[in-house]
Image (spheres, helix red, strand yellow):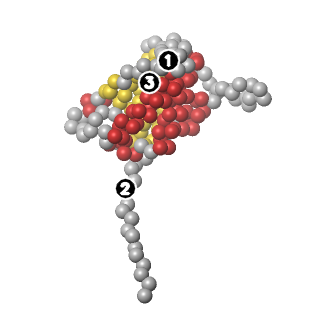
Amino acid sequence: MGSIPMQRETEARACAEDPGRPGPPAVVRTSLPGNPLAPAAARRFVRAALADWTELDVPAAAGVTDRLAEDAVLLVSELVTNAVVHAGTAVELLCRLDEAGPGEDTDALVIEVSDHHPSRAVRGEQGSPALPGTPEYGRGLQLVASLSESWGITYRTGTKTVWGRLPVEAPQPTRRSRRTTVTRP
């Protein structure tokens, strides 16, 4: 199997709301086929988006850490895998950095995965423990809930979107270390 071609489109969601807002927009989206290659392509897409935002000095990207990037990659992998396995349709992926709004403490990275399955049901987690030799599955949404500050499901006509919101830590100011030289008499 070959690689999945991806087309990344950048939107000006935040800039449209505030044309005077400095910096480039922080929303990217792509479409992925509903096949086993989609989760790996989604992981590469999210890593590239975070790297681009950091390189472009997007304001909220100053708090992007290696830990956040790892959590985001795991989150998108779980959500895309669920969409491919359970819906079997093309998958739409949106990744957005939101600056903290009124009443919010931190900026956030929001990841949305949409599928086109007509069913409104999202498979719940299995309550019984796995028996030896039983394939492990059914823990994806528990993992999403553990990683995310908040998560949920949004239904639109013909589309189901599962999303997760990861907090972006406030950037720590860099401290200049002072070298103290001790001399002995």
Residue that mark 3 sits on: 93
The tag earlier along the polypeptide, 1 or 2, is: 1
Residue 121, visible in the rendered structure: no
Q: Is residue 167 something one can see in this rendering?
A: yes
Q: Quadrant of residue 60?
A: top left
Which numbered circle lies on residue 173?
A: 2
> Left or right of 80: which side holds 63?
left
Residue 150: x percent and y percent?
49, 36
Q: Earlier in the sequence, mark 1 or mark 3?
A: 1
Separation of marks 1 and 2 at Cα, in angstroms:
44 Å
Residue 18 rendering spot, x and y as whole percentages: 24, 35
**Residue wearing tag 1:** 2
Task: Identify the element where label 1 is drawn.
Answer: loop
Residue 119 drawn at (x, y percent): 54, 13
Mark positioned earlier in the residue sequence (3 or 2): 3
Quarter of the picture holding the C terminus: bottom left
- Badge 1: few (under 14), some or many (20 or more) residues near its Cα, within 10 Å? few
The secondary structure type at the circle numbered 2 is loop
